[in-house]
Image: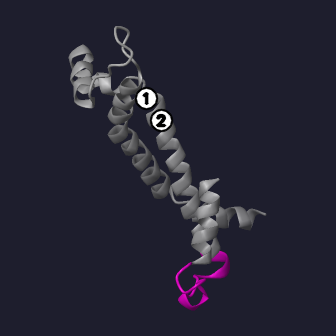
Amino acid sequence: IISHFHVIMNTISVESFVAGFAYGGMTVLVGQPFETLKTLAQVPTSTNPAAKPSLLQSARNLYNAGGFRAFYRGGVPLLMGGGLMRSAQFGVYSSVVKNLEHRYGPTEPNAYYFGCINPHVVVAGFFGGI
């Protein structure tokens, strides 16, 4: 059991977890303003529920009301959640690929399914996505 634990610990890639966190955080940093604007565009105004401002007008109104920070209101939980989720996906994927290659050796191209699907990548992608 100790030797198996040692093999697993040697296959864990801290870099993959950090890269996944950076990726997840960046997707939230880029996408949060658009999500905020989309939500505002879906909410009817109280004076005339049928009339909705344009996306540009919504952005202008939001900026005038709260500045640049208003686009990221409520984004900290999303930032942490997105970072942690992608961190786990990248880290588990990388660790599973390394563990499979350590245990079974690298997959030779002639063993790929349909000539292009690496079975180690498929298995690692499955575990990374769980």
* 111 falls in the magenta region: yes
> Total of numbered circles in the picture?
2
Residue picked out by circle 2: 80
Instruction: Pick out the residue farthest to the bottom.
Output: 110
Is residue 50 found inside the magenta-colored segment of the image? no
Res. 19 mark: none
Report x, y in % for residue 116: 52, 82
Q: How is the image coloured?
A: one colour
What amino acid is found at the position of numbered circle 1 in the picture? Val
Q: Residue 73: x, y in percent?
A: 37, 23
SS label for mark 1: helix
Q: Residue furthest front?
A: 50
Dot 1 and dot 2 residues touching (CB under 8 Å): yes
Q: Residue at x 25, y 14 (%)?
A: 65
Q: Which residues are magenta?
A: 101-117
What residue sits right under mark 1 in the picture?
Answer: 76
Q: Is residue 10 visible?
A: no
Picture quadrant where residue 38 is located: top left
Residue in the foreground of this view, choosing between 108 and 63? 63
Q: Distance from label 1 to label 2 (Cα)?
A: 6 Å
Picture coordinates of residue 74, whole percent (x, y) = 42, 24
Q: Position of residue 1 (x, y in %)?
A: 79, 63
67 vs 120, left or right, is: left
Comparing 27 with 19, the one in front is: 27
Left or right: where does residue 55 sit relative to residue 41?
left
Find the residue positioned furthest to the top: 47
* 4 relative to 117, above or below: above
